[in-house]
Image (cartoon, rainbow, N blue to C red):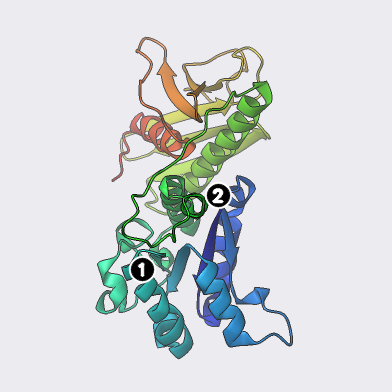
Amino acid sequence: MAKAFISYSHRDEKALERLHTHLAIMRRDGLISAWYDREILAGDDLDQKIAQALSESEVFLALASPDFLASSYCYEQEMALAIERHAEGSLRVVPIILEPCDWKSTPLAKLKALPKDGKPISTWTNENVAYLDVVTELRRILSDQQPTSADKIRGAAPSDPKRETRRYRIKKEFDEIDRDEFRHRSFSIIREFFRGSAEELNQVTDAIRARFESINDLAFSCTVLNKANNRDAHMTVRADTEHFGEDISYSFSRRAAPNTANGFVRVEASDYELYLKLDEFNRRASKESLSAEQVADALWREFTSQAGIDHE
């Protein structure tokens, strides 16, 4: 589990709360533990606790905003030390741009910022989609990150440049419960992606209407109407049926029955991990190993394309 230090201005507490909410699945998956100054108890030495938390962290999340850049403590102390450790290779600094601000004139400009293209979260039509983009990239970063415990096993400090960085993987047998829990987590990610994307689409233009419908905890339906070309699209995604075993099914119809499907999201396993594959009738199954976020994006693109809608 990676330890993340969140640096933010107290005027951005609402944004901090939203980020904390969106990190919930990653915390449950054991990928991240997030520390911020609310962990400090009354009577604790403020500077000492912050310095200790920062020294123990592997990721530094800088919630950039005008207030963050104006904060002497956030910018001149926390971020300055984090950038120094980033240069040493002992900490990864990730800028998360909350609001339009002059962050490109700071040391953060040299780093890849989130969400996509450093577009401030406050400028997205649906901020949940922006936070999902942040979480998706963080999940990818932390999945690829070398665990610091491996360096301890080799008896070397994580920042020792003489040591080759290795990524260890352990073979595992995945039982029925592992696969079912993975399928449920994946479905939850796909569902929230569609819910947020439908809300965002409703903000684009009056010519497009989108509606997300929850059928039950493991099934949902989505509809898009494009008045500009008089086209519509429907999709139902289900993980609540025994007809298709451990797969997630999808149909191009509204509230499709559990025993119907146009394609599947299949749960597959290597010797080391569980992953997803897309399979559609009349088309060969994709050989690509996908995450739940990648599947959600692929299904959304195929769904909206039927209504004559595309996006970058």
Residue 86: image tag: 1
Q: Amino acid at mark 1?
A: His
Q: Residue shown at 57%/34% (left/top)?
A: 187
Look at the picture and state if 150 lies above or below 105.
Answer: above
Q: Earlier in the sequence, mark 2 or mark 1?
A: 2
Question: Quick one: label 1, few (<14), some, or many (20+) residues within 10 Å?
Answer: some
Q: Residue shown at 28%/46% (left/top)?
A: 312
Residue positioned most to the top: 282
Q: SS at mark 1?
A: helix
Quadrant of residue 290 within the rendered picture:
top left
Residue positioned most to the right: 42
Residue positioned most to the bottom: 72
Q: Is residue 162 visible to us here?
A: yes
Q: Residue shown at 37%/30% (left/top)?
A: 302
Residue 5's spot in the image, x, y percent? 52, 68
Quadrant of residue 181 within the rendered picture:
top right
Q: Is residue 15 visible to us here?
A: no
Q: Amino acid at mark 2?
A: Leu
Residue 71's spot in the image, x, y percent? 45, 87
Look at the picture and state if 30 lies above or below 101.
Answer: above
The residue at which mark 2 appears reads as: 31
Question: Quick one: label 2, few (<14), some, or many (20+) residues within 10 Å?
Answer: some
35 or 184: nearer the viewer: 35
